Image (cartoon, rainbow, N blue to C red):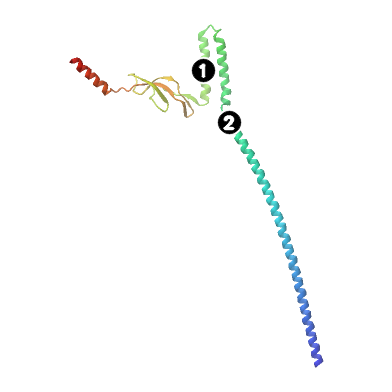
Amino acid sequence: MSDKNNNQNINDDEQVEQSQVEAENLNDVNRNENFINLEKEIEIKNKKIDELEKENLDYKDKLLRKAAEFENYKRRTEKDQLNIINYAAESFITKLLPVVDDFERSLEHINNAKDAPSIGEGVKLVYEKLMKLLDEHGVKKIDSTGKPFDFNLHEAVSQQKNDSVPPHTVIYEVEKGYMYKDRVIRHAKVVVSEDGEEHPHADNSNENSDISNNE
C-alpha cells in the first residue's frame, strides 16, 4: 500500500506540476495575445493620428488659400468701388458730349450767320436736347412761379408788394432750382410777395402825422 500511495502521490504531483505548466503556458499565450492586441491598437491609433495630422494640414492649407482668396477679393472690391466713385459720372458725361458738340457748331456759325432767328432756333434745339438728357437722368426743374413759398425748395432773395397773388407767393424766379430724383440739389432763388397785413407802427405814425397836421 505504501508503494501504491507513493506512486499515486507522484502522479498527483506530476498532474499538479503539469497543470501549473499548462496554466503558465496559457498565461503566456494570453500575455502574447494581449501584447499583440495592444500593438495592433497602438498601430491603429498611430495610423489615426497620422490621418488626423494630414487632415489638419489639409484644412490649414485650405484656410490659407481661402484667406488669400478673400484678401484678393477684398482688394478687387475696394478697387472696383473706388473706380465707381471716381468714374460715376462717366456715362452721363459721354451722353453730354454730343450736346457740347452742338454748342460748338452753333458758336462756329454765329459770326457767319446772317439769319438771327435761325441761330436762335438752333440754340433752342440744343437747349432742349440738354434738358431732355438731364430729365432722363432724374434732374428736373423746380416749378416755383405762382406757387406758395416753401423753404424746402426756395430761397427768398427779396419781397415785393403784389396784390394780384396771396401773401408769401413766389412772384418770379431769379435763379432756377433743380432736383435730382427726390433730393434738392439747388434751391430756387425767388422773389416773394409781401404779407398784406397792415403794420401797427405804420398806422400810429400816420395817425400822429394827421394830428400834427390838424394842429
Callout in the foreground (1, 2): 2
Which quadrant would residue 205 be assigned to in this image? top left
Q: Which residue is mark 1?
A: 127
Residue 153's place in the image compared with 1, above or below, is above
* Mark 1 neighbour class, 10 Å CA radius: few under 14, some 14 to 19, many 20 or more: some
Residue furthest to the left: 215
Residue at the image point whose x is 71% and y is 55% from the top: 50
Which quadrant would residue 18 be assigned to in this image? bottom right
Q: Which residue is mark 2?
A: 84
The answer to whether residue 204 is left or right of residue 16 is: left
Residue 20's place in the image compared with 50, above or below, is below
Mark 1 or 2, nearer chain start: 2
Residue at the image point whose x is 52% and y is 11% from the top: 119
Residue 56's place in the image compared with 162, above or below, is below
The answer to whether residue 171 is left or right of residue 99 is: left
Distance from Cα at disc 1 to Cα at disc 2: 29 Å
The answer to whether residue 94 is left or right of residue 209 is: right
Residue at the image point whose x is 20% and y is 15% from the top: 213
Q: Position of residue 153 (x, y in %)?
A: 42, 26
